[in-house]
Amino acid sequence: MTLRLIDLFSGAGGMSLGFCDKQFCGGFTTVLALDNDAAAVKTHELNFPGRAVQANIEEWLLNNEVPQADVVIGGPPCQGFSLLNKKRDGDARRALWEPFIEIAERSGARVFVMENVAELYRSPERQLIEAKAAQHGFQTQAAILNAADYGAPQTRKRTIILGWREANNLPSFPPLASHADPKLKVNLPRWRTVRDVIGDLPAKTVGIEIGSRPTLNLHFGRTPTAKSLERYAAVPPGGNRFDLLTNRPDITPDCWVRKTSGGTDLFGRLWWDRPSVTIRTEFYKPEKGRYLHPEANRPISHREAARLMGFPDDFRFYGTKIEVARQIGNAVPPNLAGALARVVRTILKPQALAA
């Protein structure tokens, strides 16, 4: 039996991919994807069946009938909770979980999975979300999960809220990890590393454009200035902006010279033998984080970022370079989504088949 899926704030569809694709879980099909990013909606449409709609969720809810579904998934925009946003109080985006829960109710779904930044877990907003879900008959559990523990080559911690009603089988949540930090010395495969997923790509970017043949069609980079190239070369393996200051103070930006603490990932170089840091929407700007290639004197390419997020090479992206970068950085790693999908599948599986 194929289970019907609604993906809200769907972006490119990383979460849909984890639920629907057999290499991650399978057994689900999308009946509706909703997002206000036109390019992301087009990407979702290129990769999944069902309707993909560009709309403001609150406006769409006023004027449309919600299709029936078995599960509703998605991540209401996280910027209102994120520590990267210093003006969190009163951010209207914090309330977009309300139409999420309303759609879960109106669709008849028996399960929802809500993803957000780790900071939500200890936020008063989480209590409001769970109280609202309870009003609609959903029991909930929440946990902070690290995508690396589920096979993603990236340490990305996220709050997951699982809601269910009329369950055939009680959930086993959080899902059991499939991988582990090698420092823990537990009987699980080690975390997947940067080398595992991008080590076969050419050190030199090739500039093949979006929409051309897979694998190298996103393996492009910026056109750096001579000074940028000098700065990249001054950062050793695993280094960061402090190494730049030590090795080449003459080309270190004044703002970094003055700021002598914090920001150890800024202008950092990834390690081959570790998972990547969290991939964000501006991964092509090393001044934003640890986004320099482990060896090459350049930021990681879009293809490398997509692989570090967990997207297979045959996943089709649509949009400009900036739009595609935003889709990659905002995605839920499909490996993590697949682990959650298996929990949902167990909840919805008829009891006679639950063993």
Image (cartoon, rainbow, N blue to C red):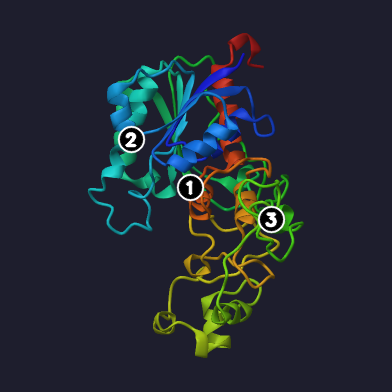
**Left or right: residue 310 compared with residue 103:** right
Q: Earlier in the sequence, mark 2 or mark 3?
A: 2
* Residue located beneath label 3 in the image: 193
| Mark 3 and mark 1: Cα distance apart in space | 20 Å
For label 1, the residue is: 330
- Give the alpha-carbon distance from disc 1 to disc 2, as whole Å: 17 Å
Numbered label attached to residue 56: 2
Amino acid marked by disc 2: Asn
Q: Position of residue 255 (x, y in %)?
A: 40, 80
Residue at 59%, 66% in the rendered image: 299
Name the outermost residue toward the bottom: 250
* Residue 275 relative to residue 278: left or right: right
Specify the amino acid type for callout 3.
Answer: Thr
Q: Residue at x 47, y 66 (%)?
A: 288
Query: Residue 272 occupies which quadrant of the picture?
Result: bottom right
Q: Secondary structure at mark 1?
A: loop
